[in-house]
Image: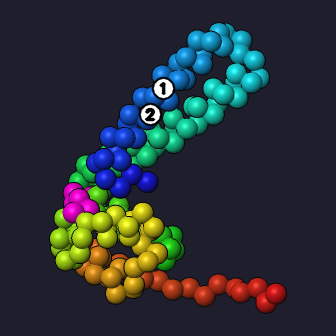
């Protein structure tokens, strides 16, 4: 997931490199690529598609038109908070300022998906971003192995 403008620009650069490599592979393969050439083309295409999807998601969030996010589980809350920050148009520095911490702390939180953050800190982040979380808890079956 792209979490800031620096990563966004870097990802766009990498996508350009993958697209150039793909064009070169297709040119070298001609109209009847060997199995190995087709595997290379497919691998580079898949990677380029992944980068395009990340770029589109960041652009969608950055557009300011997204205001609702879903997390399929409690573990997904970290991604939701990152998405909310981006959609709010806030940099990691601005969130850090709101919380009274260093920007590097927000970078660490986001790079580790808030694994090192306490529940209280996660609540602080949600409050600073103006995120309302609707909780639902459901018991699932536990294997008695």
| Distance CA(mark 2)–CA(mark 1) | 6 Å
- In the rendered view, does 57 fall on the left or right side of 140? left
Residue 8 visible: yes
What residue did someone put label 1 on?
Answer: 19
**Which quarter of the figure is the N terminus placed in?**
bottom left
Q: Which residues are magenta?
A: 87-93
Foreground pick, 113 / 63: 113
- In the rendered view, does 102 fall on the left or right side of 44? left
Which residue is depicted at the point 24% across and 70% down?
102
Foreground pick, 102 / 117: 102
Which residue is depicted at the point 70% across and 24% down?
38
Which residue is depicted at the point 30% across and 47% down?
6
Residue 49 at x, y = what percent? 52, 37
Which residue is depicted at the point 44% across and 33% down?
15
- How is the model colour-coded? rainbow
Within 10 angstroms of label 2, few (less than 14), some, or many (20 or more) residues? some
* Res 15 label: 2
Q: Secondary structure at mark 1?
A: helix
Foreground pick, 104 / 37: 104
Residue extending furthest toward the top: 30
State the image quarter where residue 43 is shown: top right
- In the rendered view, does 24 fall on the left or right side of 133? right
Q: Secondary structure at mark 2?
A: helix
């Amino acid at each position: 997931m792209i979490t800031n403008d620096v990563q966004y620009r870097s990802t766009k650069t990498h996508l350009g490199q993958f697209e150039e490599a793909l064009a070169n592979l297709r040119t070298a393969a001609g109209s009847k690529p060997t199995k190995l050439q087709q595997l290379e083309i497919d691998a580079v295409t898949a990677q380029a598609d992944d980068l395009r999807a990340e770029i589109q998601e960041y652009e969608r969030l950055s557009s300011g038109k997204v205001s609702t996010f879903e997390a399929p589980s409690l573990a997904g809350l970290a991604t939701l908070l990152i998405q909310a920050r981006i959609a709010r148009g806030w940099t990691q520095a601005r969130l850090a300022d709101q919380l009274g911490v260093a920007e590097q702390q927000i970078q660490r939180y986001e790079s580790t998906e808030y694994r090192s953050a306490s529940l209280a800190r996660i609540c602080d982040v949600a409050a600073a971003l103006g995120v309302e979380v609707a909780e639902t808890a459901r018991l699932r079956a536990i294997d008695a192995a």
